[in-house]
Image (tube, helix red, strand yellow):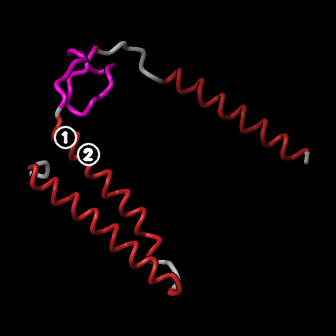
Amino acid sequence: MMVCQWLGLAMLIFGGVLVFVSFGLSPKGEGSREKNSPFECGFDPHGGARAPFSLRFFLLGVVFLIFDVEIVLLFPLTVSDGDFMNSWGVLSVVFMMGLLGGTLHEWREGSLD
């Protein structure tokens, strides 16, 4: 038991030494404004915060989220027992028909173009 306490203390001291060594070896330069700013996937972080909102991108994200939830809900059907196959089969067909209807609606609206 005493070995565990000493080992924990040794790891704590070793971690502290590593932190102080890293502060000592790190460069002290301030850097430019561009280097100190976070990377935002190509967007200028110093510009205005009010960017135009893309409704098509939002709708595509919602459709993607719906199909992700579909996968999560249909995955248990593959590992279910054969006893529940009739009820699960009817439920999955109804679920897939609803998703197919929604996909056709999105396609007719032009959201998937």
Observer-nearest of 51 and 36: 51
* Disc 2 + disc 1, Cβ < 8 Å: yes
Where on the picture, by quarter, is residue 19? Answer: top right
The stretch of residues the image draws in magenta is 33-53
In the image, residue 72 sits, relative to residue 4, either above or below, namely below
Specify few, some or many for label 2: CA neighbours under 10 Å numbering under 14, 14-19, or 20 or more.
few
Q: Secondary structure at mark 2?
A: helix
Q: Which residue is mark 2?
A: 61
Observer-nearest of 37 and 98: 98
Could you say where residue 59 lies in the image, as x and y percent from the top left? Answer: 21, 43
Q: CA distance from mark 2 to mark 1?
A: 6 Å
Is 54 on the left or on the right of 39, as rendered? left
Q: Which residue is mark 1?
A: 57
Where on the picture, by quarter, is residue 108? Answer: bottom left
Could you say where residue 1 lies in the image, as x and y percent from the top left? Answer: 91, 48
Specify few, some or many for label 1: CA neighbours under 10 Å numbering under 14, 14-19, or 20 or more.
few
